[in-house]
Amino acid sequence: MSKVFTRKDIDILTFNESFITERKPYRLYEHLNKLASQDIYVVDVTLIHAEEDNNLTHNHYMIRIVRPVFDVEVKTYHSNEFTGGWHHVRTEVFGYYESKDEALKIEKEHTDKNNSDIKFETKIRFHSPLNKSI
């Protein structure tokens, strides 16, 4: 099985947080939990700049992430006049899309082509980087 995610899929986000110097940076952890709840894999977090101003600490982070993707699996069937049924011809997978809307467009393109001689059965598949290797 080929890898869905590669190093080229790594995106960079920035996150800024200010907090009272005696406390811990809890908002960063809340943000990381929010990313994980969206099936976003956090590769690493780097503190790129920190400064103290009076009793406040200002931290600037770089967060490297990998987002989930969708693909569209299309099974093609041809009409079999002798049996009156459908004969499976091939299965293809079309692209990797960052949003489900993009995948739905590809799915609709194929389902709109259905007629009495050919039938397309489509399925949108979700790939989470939390469940696959990079």
Image (cartoon, helix red, strand yellow):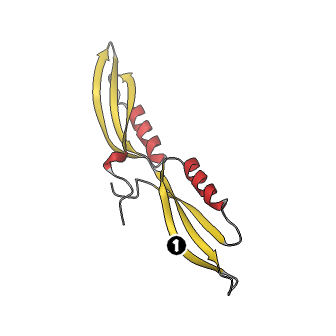
Q: Residues within 10 Å of mark 1 (few under 14, many from 20)?
A: few
Q: Residue 89, percent across and down?
A: 55, 75
**Residue that mark 1 sits on:** 90
Query: In the image, is residue 4 above or below residue 23?
Result: below
Query: In the image, is residue 98 above or below residue 111?
Result: above
For the C terminus, the quadrant is bottom left
Q: How many marks?
A: 1
Q: Is residue 94 left or right of residue 14?
A: right
Q: Residue 41, percent across and down?
A: 39, 47
Is 37 in front, or is 9? 9
Is 41 in front, or is 97? 97
Q: Residue 55, percent across and down?
A: 34, 15
Query: In the image, is residue 92 above or below residue 108?
Result: below
State the residue at coordinates (43%, 37%).
31
Q: Residue 125, percent across and down?
A: 52, 60
Is 10 in front, or is 35? 10
Residue 54: which quarter of the image? top left
Identity of the amino acid at label 1? Arg
State the residue at coordinates (35%, 59%).
3
Q: In the image as oriented, which residue stretches furthest toward the bottom?
A: 82
State the residue at coordinates (67%, 65%).
114
Q: Secondary structure at mark 1?
A: strand
For the N terminus, the quadrant is bottom left
Residue 128: which quarter of the image? bottom left
